[in-house]
Image: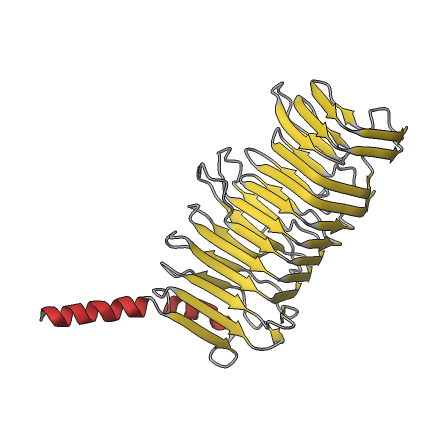
Amino acid sequence: MNYLKLLITIILLIWNGITVDVYIPNDYELSDIEKISMQYVNNNDIKIYINEEYYVFDVIGGLKIKMPYNGNLSVIGNPSNKTLIDFTNKKKYNTVVDFSTYTGQTLTFENIIFYNFIDPAVSEASHLFYSNVKNLNFNIVFKNCVFDTGNMIILKLDSYRELITSELNHQILFESCKFNEVKYNQLFIFNNSGFNRVNRIGMKIINSEFTNCNDIIKMEFGITEFDNCKFSNLSTSQNQAIFGEIKYYSILNIKNTIFFDINETKSVVPFITINNNFLSFYNVTMENVHNKLGYLIRNTYKIKNKEYINIESSTFDSQNSKINITNSVFKNLINPNTFSNVVDIKNGEVYMNNCEINNIR
């Protein structure tokens, strides 16, 4: 009897450790992803391969992905030319990612082109991917993906809890992705509905390109880093900031990144709006970046506390800040307004080291 129990235990352990490979459209359709994730929820890894280069998405409403309790789920497109998922016939769509437990699981999308994801009634409720986050022990990865032509939020996270960690890890990763013609909404929203709590959810976007997009990010919590990215022809439809609106305890780091050919003269908004947040630019280049307002960064915080803005190769405005500018070049800046070209603050400290200033008027 004891041997039988041991055998059953071993079989269960082996079964729970199996990696399941699913092929679309051979075994299932993409609309079955919720059924697949529920069916194999106890397995360590579920890998869904889409064999087609072109796939018409045929789901009414949206999908719910229930993550395995102790494993990972991957959706992998064609390794050569990617798989284009066409949302043209879908008037409204969203994918809800459900982490019933947080055990370090990873949800991965790789080699996928998300095309024509348009909601006629566009709003903050229009999003491709959504999750209500209650713990930091998870990962969502987009690798070698393209988001082409849409007006929906690509990723929206809600979180109303205080989530603190001493480690500066990231839970969200976009690696080697392209974003083209995504407009009339923010691309990324971290929403806490006004709950001013410390929340250290991290997102990292690396080796990626953004072209002809609106309103890249709105943050009410978390730490976001853009590294080795390219941005061109950005604009705004939300009329808060061209690039990002950063609030509460959120942190924005931008490094090794180029902004070029940005000319937003329809809306009188800055490039970035912060509210006494930590903002860091490192090895950032801005070429032909213009707005109607006349400066790039606005700090809306009014209390006389000192916060740090570390910045290179940019024009900025801030109040009540300690600003360090190092190894930067400011040249050929023509300002039609009465305030300073480089820094315009009422209360604060400005330090410049090893900088070049040429032809500013």
Image spot of residue 114 (x, y percent): 63, 65
Q: Residue furthest left?
A: 1
Image spot of residue 121 (x, y percent): 65, 57
Image spot of residue 229 (x, y percent): 69, 50
Q: Residue at x 67, y 57 (%)?
A: 151
Q: Residue at x 33, y 66 (%)?
A: 17
State the scheme by which the image is colored.
Answer: secondary structure
Is residue 254 visible in the rendered image? The answer is yes
Q: Which quadrant holds the N terminus?
A: bottom left
Q: Which quadrant holds the C terminus?
A: top right
Q: Residue at x 74, y 25 (%)?
A: 352
Q: Is residue 121 above or below residue 292?
A: below
Image spot of residue 260 (x, y percent): 79, 47
Q: Is residue 313 above or below residue 212?
A: above
Q: Residue furthest front?
A: 354
Is residue 240 visible in the rendered image? The answer is no
Decide which of 287, 93 is in the foreground and name it: 287
Q: Is residue 94 above or below residue 25?
A: above
- Determine whether, in the image, residue 42 is placed left or right of residue 58: left
Q: Is residue 104 above or below residue 1?
A: above
- Determine whether, in the image, residue 342 is placed left or right of residue 160: right
